[in-house]
Image (cartoon, coloured by chain):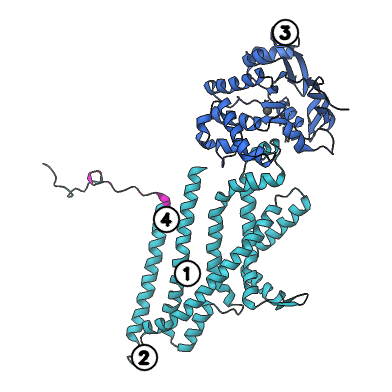
Amino acid sequence: MAWTADQPLIALVDVHKSFGKTEVLKGITFSVAKGEVICVIGPSGSGKSTLLRCINALVPIDRGSIKVEGQEVNDPALDKLALRRKVGMVFQQYNLFPHKTALQNVMMAPIQVLKQDRKEVEERAHRLLRKVRLQDKASSYPGELSGGQQQRVAIARSLAMNPDVMLFDEVTAALDPETKKEVLVTIRELAEEGMTCLLVTHEMGFAREVAHRIHFTDGGRIIESGPPEEFFAKAKDPRTRQFLSQIL
Amino acid sequence: MRAPPNSTDLPVLLPMARPVRASEIGKVELGRAGLWAMLVVAAIGLIGEARAAPSDPGLLALLWKWAPLIFQGFLFNLLVSFLSMAIGTAAGAVLGLAQVSLLPQVRQASWFATQFFRNAPWLVLLFYCMFLLPFEIRLFDYVIPLPAWFKATIGLALPVMANMAEIVRGGVQSVPAAQLESAEALAFTRRQILWQIILPQCVTRMTPPWMNLYAILTMATPLISIVGVQESMSLTRAALNAEGRIELLVPMYLMLLVWFFLYCYPIARWTIRLERRFAVKI
Ligand SMILES: Nc1ncnc2c1ncn2[C@@H]1O[C@H](COP(=O)(O)OP(=O)(O)OP(=O)(O)O)[C@@H](O)[C@H]1O
Ligand SMILES: [Mg+2]
């Protein structure tokens, strides 16, 4: 059965994952439609990073199903590389390649992985760096960039693969308030352009503004979900309320 | 009353000396001590010359006479060091990468091989190679001879390989796991990650210990004289036997020591410089 754009782009059903004896994900079910922006919030250690890693097969799951554009991720015969070409991911610690310039960081994967024409890729890379407002840093090495600048290069690097969905894992957690804003603006622009985004974040103000839906996780389960107005105004579960009262 | 300049006993009033870093002291002192040792040994040699009977040719003249031959032997030591290093580096790189393989059997086997050759005396490995390797290899119709010096080169390459494997393994593992993860998320293959992302990052870190290994190997090359390969050491011994003059012993070995020193010391200095440069950059 072919996947069509009206079906969820990502669909998780009863996803379970354990590391040794500790069960990190205890049955996660939700879906992300094309063009949707979904925020996942929750206390530290509740399995948010693990959840994102499962979606692009960096971590195998034990039970349940994850479908990306209709393709089952929990399948031994899965073409992981094909999946990862569709799913972009940005990490908290940027993880740029320190031996390459900003421009080279952006160009590397399209040239090596997608085998695209270098000239075309270079043009696109410049365009992407302009989009994240770093056109004048193209030849800087990561070590010469601030945290916020590195994170924006990392976003451009991911976008260079033309992914269908972007996963953001607490991408502003290591940044100070000023640089945080630069990165959040970049992500919001992406969201407004219609990019499908799944974000793990502690930025409640940001989540309230850009998210279509918010999921609150604790102890490996989704405790509460809803559109932001509803979620922030009338959270029902005491755990959600407690978390929100701590963080707001 | 004003004290005239430089006549004070108070240390605070003396001009300040240039501060010397601890690491610098060690090196400067070592270098100086080495030079002093050579001068002393050379002086002993010259005293010996002064005492020699007037009819005999002088010690310096004898040194001069034998120097070209021994120097050829020294060049042969260097040749063996190049070859051993090349073979050991190539094999060690493979062995080191095998230690970070995804297959547990490959990982364990290469770990064992590395530990075995790294913790064996070099001379014992050399003996094993001399006796276990055949003197020729038959490949279909071709007969490839394996001369003694080549077997000795292999013998020295084995410990180099094991040490190189450790350098490579350490280098690869020094790259943060997050680098690997973000490369995987960008759909790079394992092979691309290794060659494009991990190795370029750790080559700089692996260079100083690799150069250090080379210097150690070069200084170990006279070991091959023990298994009967003619090089600078055995030629020096032969020259001494031919002249039969006991007072020639010290200056002649000194000459050899100086050559090794002049070759290895700059490598050591360069290694330290690189180490410092990379330490600043990373
Ligand atoms: N590779 C792993 N091996 C073993 N345990 C792991 C591994 N990765 C994560 N864990 C454990 O799984 C649990 C959830 O981790 P995860 O990083 O997903 O939480 P998180 O919600 O992202 O937390 P944070 O907000 O601190 O980033 C933690 O207890 C962590 O120790
Ligand atoms: Mg996390």
Measuring from the top left, give residue B154's x and y in whole percent.
65, 69
Q: Chain of mark 1?
A: B
Camera-side residue: A17 or A85?
Answer: A85
Residue underneath mark 2: B56
Mark 3, Cα crowd under 10 Å, few <14 / some 14-19 / many 20+, is few
Q: Amino acid at mark 3?
A: Glu
Disc 1 is placed on an element classified as: helix
Residue underneath mark 4: B26
Q: Is residue B147 left or right of residue B102?
A: left
Residue B46 in view in this figure: yes
User: In percent of the image, x 75 and y 21: which residue is there?
Assistant: A34
Measuring from the top left, give residue B248's x and y in whole percent.
42, 83
Depth check, mark 4 against mark 2: the one in front is 2
Alpha-carbon span between mark 1 and mark 2: 29 Å
State the hue of chain A. blue
Measuring from the top left, give residue B191's x and y in whole percent.
70, 47
Whether label 1 lies within 8 Å of ligand 1 gets the answer: no
Residues indicated by labels 3 and 1 sit on the same polypeptide chain: no
Residue underneath mark 3: A230
Disc 4 is placed on an element classified as: helix
Labelled pair 3, 1 in contact (Cβ < 8 Å) = no
Depth check, mark 3 against mark 2: the one in front is 3
Residue underneath mark 1: B260
Depth check, mark 3 against mark 1: the one in front is 3
The range drawn in magenta is: B12-23
Q: Amino acid at mark 4?
A: Gly
Residue most extreme to the top: A234
Question: Is residue A165 depicted above or below B148 in this figure?
Answer: above
State the hue of chain B. cyan
